[in-house]
Image (tube, rainbow, N blue to C red):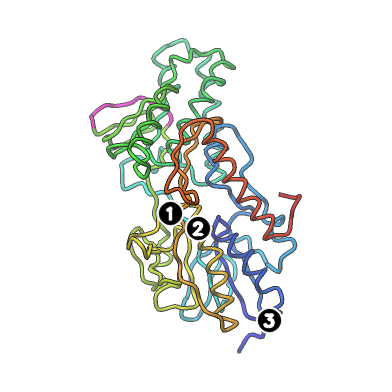
Amino acid sequence: MERSQKNIVVIGAGYGGITAALRVARLFRDQSDFQVHLVDRNPYHLLKTQLHEAAVRKTEVAIPIDRLIGKRNIIFHLAEVDKIDPNDRIVFLQEGFLPFDYLIMALGSQTNFYGIPGLRENAFTLETLADAEKIHDHIDRLCARASSEPDEAQRRELLRFVIGGGGLSGVEFAAEFAEYAVQCTRNYHVNLDEVDIILVEAGKRIMANLEESTSASVSKRLQGMRVRVLTETKIVSQTDSTVTLSSNEVLETRTMIWTGGIHITDMFRESGMKIGKLGRVLVDEFLRAESYPFIYAIGDNALAMNPRTGSPVPTAAQFALQQGRLVAENIFAAVTGGELRPYSPKVWGEVVSLGRHLAAGWLALPFVKKVTFVGFLGSLVKAAIEGKHILLLRKESRNWTGL
């Protein structure tokens, strides 16, 4: 039986998903025969690039979905997606299902443990709001326990914190925590010299996507904040009280934060869609899944190619935001007989925060190829980038005061 109303379903309310849902709803506001549905397992949009702040300082990084969609024609479904049937155009939820005419897949990614023994069972991850809250409480408990531990070796074990992965998440967490360690030890009357923060990176340098000189500056800053930076070193196993490195060093610790990699849900492969590296969906120049022109993939879910370089577009929030806006406009064009626009990523730059008041990175500015920076100016740039996302959300949702 043919449905009288057509559904545009967005699965995932991350950076790309929430942007796509709000933009689609705005574009189709005069199309009464189209209904927009948004599905997510959480009732909030998570500012994932700021999770390290929530894990250390307990800052607010979640925006309730109802504040975002209150003035838009969007039906929100608080649910887990179980599977997708692209041939019958159905998204199956844990309870019920949603038929769709167009589907936007924006489910983000999951932590990749690479089969390292003991890592999944013992490491903390930094992917969700619950992860951040768990890390924050754990750190506070260890500082409190260390304050009354008479044995120095035991105190040092409690106060040794290992971060696996020298990419953006690992570096930002290490810097944020290094600042917080000063406050935590002061509050609990613990000797700061007994705190040992270790950042472990398998590659030759941390933040390998930055220029070598900027990467070196970031490493130097971290070391100045009492962070030990170990490069060309892998984590080979973990227990509940030790982390073993490829150098054969065994670190006695109760805390391992793993930020070393991602993989994409197997749901897309199981649905019959064509899959590429890391489980990302193969898409055409318009971000449509191959063989399914009514299904779009964005963000971490899409193996989108940069037409200028022929290389895959990185998994970063700035690209997910661009893709979310584009697919909304392409679906509207497909429905109204307009011309679809191919995806061409705009690289704005990259900024890595080094605590509350410092940052490093680069920006692409008009008439200037690239501007690099390290220091206080960078923190202002980082704050401006984060503020721009909130501003765009307010614009799309027409909620200028409630976010």
Question: Disc 1 on helix, strand or loop?
Answer: loop
Q: Which residues are magenta?
A: 247-255
Residue at 68 percent of width and 52 percent of height:
64
Residue at 59 percent of width and 66 percent of height:
95
Left or right: 279 in relation to 52: left
The amino acid type, in three-letter code, at marker 2 is: Ala
Are dots 1 and 3 in contact, CB under 8 Å? no
The residue where tag 3 is placed is 33
Question: Disc 3 on helix, strand or loop?
Answer: loop
Q: CA distance from mark 1 to mark 3?
A: 34 Å
Q: Using the image, tell me which numbered label, if any, was put on residue 315.
A: 1
Image vertical order of residue 271 relative to residue 112, above or below: below
Q: Using the image, tell me which numbered label, if any, was put on residue 99.
A: none
Residue at 53 percent of width and 67 percent of height:
326
Left or right: 213 in relation to 65: left
Indicate the position of residue 72 as horizontal and vertical percent values.
71, 65
Q: Using the image, tell me which numbered label, if any, was put on residue 320.
A: 2
Q: How many labels, in total?
A: 3
Indicate the position of residue 229 as horizontal and vertical percent values.
35, 29
Are dots 1 and 2 in contact, CB under 8 Å? yes
